[in-house]
Image (cartoon, rainbow, N blue to C red):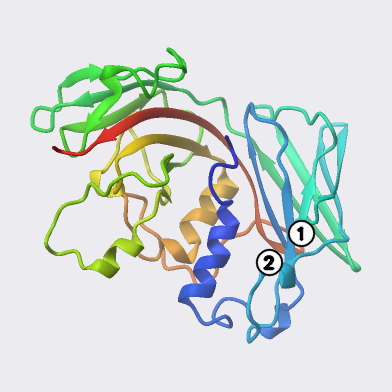
Amino acid sequence: MYRLFLSVFSLFLLSCAAERDPGSLFGPAEQGTLVIDATLLVDLPMPPIFIRQTIAPNAVYTQDAAAVNNAEVTITQGVAEYTYTPDPTGQPGQYLPPAGPPMILPETEYRILVRSGGKEARAVTTTPKRFTIDEALMINVDTLEPIRNLVTFRDDPTAVFTAPQNQVIYQDNLLETRFQLINVKAYQVGLINLETDSEFVIEGDFLEDEDFENFERKSSSPPLEVTDGNLRLPWFAIAYAGRYVIKVFAMDNNWFDFARSSPENDNIAFGSLAGDNFERPLFHIDGGIGLFGSASVDSIGFVILPKN
């Protein structure tokens, strides 16, 4: 489930290519800088890792051009050392953990070391505590009083998309998740529509035909500050009917700093911690750039029904 949507750093690279002049973030002197793309999720297996390099500011970015395919990649946890190997299928720049990779532990320090072509990049992350969503419920839009609880994956994973209480009419009241806060600065939400051809639910004469091309079935929020353990889903994040999974990530400091300083968060939406208009993202990687971060995550599922 942790590969349901694109890695954070892949999204960052795409946003740079689409919205900014390639020399505005990294100058020619930084061509060939190692780029680490790795996120560790508590209680999930040690994940694949992407190793890339920056390319010339005036060159067109492609995964093949940026891929580093001959690196030495190692993750250590305490005295344990895990050597990654290039993906045998030839996925550009992807490295896989050893067979039978261990689960990522909570509140544990992990280190990464990447060597390639005489260059070396290092980073360290400390994973957050385990994080769980205690309740998912519909609340009254006027009184904010609970109307009904939704079935969660923890209650019955087979009933999440079939239970009557999980059939949610678009813009009918509010959907809220409740959880105990843990030792992180912020949370990030990933929203995934599991359908491929379900109908569009947003209504309005203000939408032109070309506007529909801008709506996607997967999206993520900027970092969200949560002070009371209650997190509501904004309706404008929903565009299609059908089955949805919401993933709430409790982010480590590396992930938090990277997400709040990345260019795609210049225009804040989805409710968030305001960005500081960073000229350059915060990477926390010695000898390179990118993201080596960690998070705890939990999910809920439901079905969006059109108003009619």
How many labels were placed on the picture? 2
Question: At x 73% / y 44%, what residue is drawn?
Answer: 48
Q: Residue furthest top?
A: 155
Residue 40, image x, y percentages: 65, 39
Image-based side of 193 in relation to 259, left or right:
left
Q: CA distance from mark 2 to mark 1?
A: 8 Å
Image-based side of 219 in relation to 97, left or right:
left
Question: At x 24% / y 30%, what residue is drawn?
Answer: 168
Residue 279, image x, y percentages: 50, 73
Kindly identify the amino acid type of the residue bearing the numbered disc 1: Gly
| Quarter-of-image position of residue 258 | bottom right
Quadrant in which the N terminus is drawn: top right
Residue 281, image x, y percentages: 55, 64
Kindly identify the amino acid type of the residue bearing the numbered disc 2: Gln
Q: Are marks 2 and 1 in contact (CB under 8 Å)?
A: yes
Q: Which mark is residue 63?
A: 2
Q: Which residue is mark 1?
A: 93
Image position of 112 with respect to 60: above or below: above
Q: Helix, strand, or loop for circle 1?
A: loop
Image-based side of 20 in relation to 99, left or right:
left
Q: Tell me which label, 2 or 1, sits earlier in the chain.
A: 2
Q: Residue furthest right?
A: 118
Q: Residues within 10 Å of mark 1 (few under 14, many from 20)?
A: many
Residue 281 seen in render: no
